[in-house]
Amino acid sequence: MTTDRVHHVVIVGGGFGGIETARRLARAKVRVTLVDQRNHHLFQPLLYQVATASLATSEIAWPIRSLMRDHRNVTTLLGTVAGVDTQGRRVLLADGGSVGFDTLVLATGARHAYFGHDEWERFAPGLKTIEDATAIRRRILSAFERAERAVDDAEREAHLTFVVIGGGPTGVELAGTIAELARETLRRDFRTFDTRDARVVLVEAGPRILAGFRESLSGYARTALAKLGVEVRLGHPVTRCTDEGVEIDGVCLPAKTILWAAGVAASPAAEWLHAPADRAGRVKVEPGLTVPGHPDIFAIGDTASIAMPDGKPVPGIAPAAKQEGHYVADAIRARLDGKPPPPPFRYRDAGSLATIGKRAAVVDFGWLRLTGRLAWWLWGLAHIYFLIGLRHRLAVALSWLWIYLTGQRSARLITQGPDAGGPQAG
């Protein structure tokens, strides 16, 4: 145990689960330290909109310190966690420092998974952070700039071919928005080619896109994508990625922009703890979300694997992480108050939503299923509701309304980086 008189709870990760846990402990008789390698909390469900020039980074991210400002028992630390000393009860930091704990909550999120082909990452970046989003936006917009300067049709076609790998919500949303960007937003901006000639290909190894939705909604999404001009290829995985394109069934598809939305893996938390993990690396937690053999260590969100009553794993989405954070805070409070622990964690399904461009979406609440424009408005209202702060809600709502009415996206900035289209400083 640490020598502090006040029980010390350390939370690793400032995502939905970590922030929810900290907030729920804000008035408890504990000292809370929240550690994250970035200084901001990110609303990940809208990250693809930064990548496709629909929203600015400041509209979907908030400084963690400002979120915790009024919680006097919460200290925020900027640092990268490198491991956990379970015997010494310390969180080890990459810079050589450490933080002692009485109770530890691991909410460390997920990273990209390339199914044994990590070398593909340089050709097909994934989307998990603000840095990922701005880099992808740079790639997408630079592709059109390079097409303007292309010397022949083959080169131009390669620059105007966008391949999105993975038919889950992120892949569907990326593909649909890129298609709209080419067919509406940029249509009058270039002179040597027609942006509507851009080719967007969505590749899914399984038999249908949006596999987590009902089959009827999956079918609607495929039809809606086709109306936007997106080619959907099902049942054939990508077998190779290079800087020239992708290979599917032994056939090369030339493409200069490849985006990865096919899978994620958990952070190395299970390795730190030498704990049992599932195939994605998530810690197999007890019904009370504790790590086996470590009753004072909790794992939540994308770090944890726990089954629902039907045997399926709790999905790695924001509502699940928030529910788990709420549960863990209640469990910690009960322990300190000498009360019985809460009953085993049970996920309350909040439904599934995905958008296809700016005019269509699919919504599945179990008791209610919607498609089309009404579903899109409901999708938008749901996401605006979960944003933090009135200013952000108004800013996002106005941006979406402007895009809906005009088709124009104001965040079309190519910032300098390895994928930028302009000359680089020497």
Image (cartoon, grey):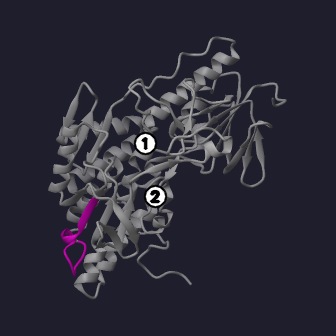
Frontmost residue, 18 versus 75: 18
Q: Is residue 199 magenta?
A: yes
Frontmost residue, 68 versus 149: 149
Report whether 361 appears left or right of 80: left
Could you tell me how far apart the alpha carbons at marks 2 and 1 are, in whole angstroms?
37 Å
Provide the secondary structure element on which disc 2 rests: loop
Q: Amino acid at mark 1?
A: Arg
Mark 2 closeness class: few <14, some 14–19, many ≥20 residues within 10 Å: some
Q: Amino acid at mark 2?
A: Tyr
Image quadrant for the C terminus?
Answer: bottom right
Residue 391 — which label? 1
Residue at (65%, 11%) from the top-left corner?
A: 339
Provide the secondary structure element on which disc 1 rests: helix
Residue 93 — which label? none
Q: Among all residues in the image, which is located at the extreme right?
A: 3
- Residue 77: % across, % down: 68, 45
Q: Point out the frontmost of discs 2 and 1.
A: 2
Frontmost residue, 176 versus 164: 164
Q: Where 355 sits versus 326, above or below? A: below
Q: State which region is magenta.
A: 189-202
Is residue 79 visible in this depiction of the protein? no
The answer to which quarter of the image holds residue 260 is bottom left
Residue 114 — which label? 2
Residue at (32%, 47%) from the top-left corner?
A: 398
